[in-house]
Image (cartoon, rainbow, N blue to C red):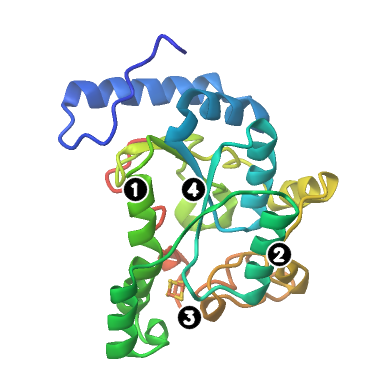
Amino acid sequence: MDSYKVWITKTDGLSDLIMAIQQEEINQLNSEFRNATLIEVLAYVLDRFQDNVILASSLGLEDQILTHFVQRHSKKARIMVLDTLRLNQETYDLLKQMQEEYQVTYEIYYPNNDAVEALVSTKGTHSFYESIENRKECCHIRKIEPLTRVLKTVDAWITGLRKDQSVTRQDMALFEYDQTHKILKVNPLIHWDYETVRDVIKAEKIPYNALHDQGYPSIGCEPCTRAVKEGEDIRAGRWWWEAADQKECGLHSNKDKKS
Ligand code: SF4
């Protein structure tokens, strides 16, 4: 795979030929790593991209597993957290635990202060409950803009996405070309199920958010997350007032996705 050194990023207006070569590489990566372990995928990506790859962590179960194995491979690997300023106290507690006990040096990114002030001043503190447009506006200010800012510094990012988390994630692959940010997107847990995630957290004794033991399978911002009942879908606690096919904050939208 080292002979494939054609990864060209951060270049708007890529020619069709270069796009085709990149897509060919992604197809080859997906084929080559089809049966690879999590550790093998992470080792390849971290060694290949070094400072130019970042793990985007929400401190959820999946990202805790990735953080654990990324740190094991390299203490210098870049790991980022978006602090939307609306996280649960339990999430901040876990962040502190990871920084102090696990010695993780997170890059922590905040929303643009002027944008948050303008939003709250004009629409109040809970406008996201009023319409999908308002909710997406809040997610854009608090999540997408800061993520976009940091992804401009890398050629690849690692996510904890899994297919069975959402109907909107069914066509995702292990390696994808992120059309929105024009970089490589790596989803090492894409085929994992929730039981495997819980098993690995337990087996490896990885710290996790205390809310997971209080009925929260998926945790985002405090006002937009709630516990689910027995038998409910794991995404039922996120943006519960919206239809299932609307439940994405936009962090993982991939316009014109080809893989
Ligand atoms: Fe705003 Fe809710 Fe989106 Fe957080 S999840 S950014 S509070 S709308």
- Give the residue number, with chain letter if any, for mark 3: 241
Assign a secondary structure to mark 3.
Answer: loop
Nearest the viewer among 36 and 229 is 36
**Kind of element beneath mark 2:** loop
Dot in front, 1 or 4 = 1
The residue identified by callout 1 is 254
Q: Amino acid at mark 2?
A: Asn
**Mark 2 or mark 4, which has the lower sequence index?**
4
Question: Residue 61 appears in which quarter of the rendering?
Answer: bottom right
Disc 4 marks a residue whose amino acid type is Gln
> Can you identify the residue that label 4 sits on?
170
Q: Is mark 1 within 8 Å of ligand 1?
A: no
Please name which of the two marks, 2 or 3, marks the residue nearer to the observer: 2
Estimate the x, y position of residue 193 in percent, counting from the top left: 67, 48
Residue occupying the point 34% across, 71% down: 136
Q: Position of residue 179 (x, y in %)?
A: 30, 42
Residue at figure coordinates x 51%, y 76% from the top left: 86
Q: How far is mark 1 from mark 4, CA to CA?
A: 13 Å
**Badge 2 residue CB within 8 Å of ligand 1:** no
Q: Which residue, given by chain and number where applicable, does mark 2 sit on?
A: 209
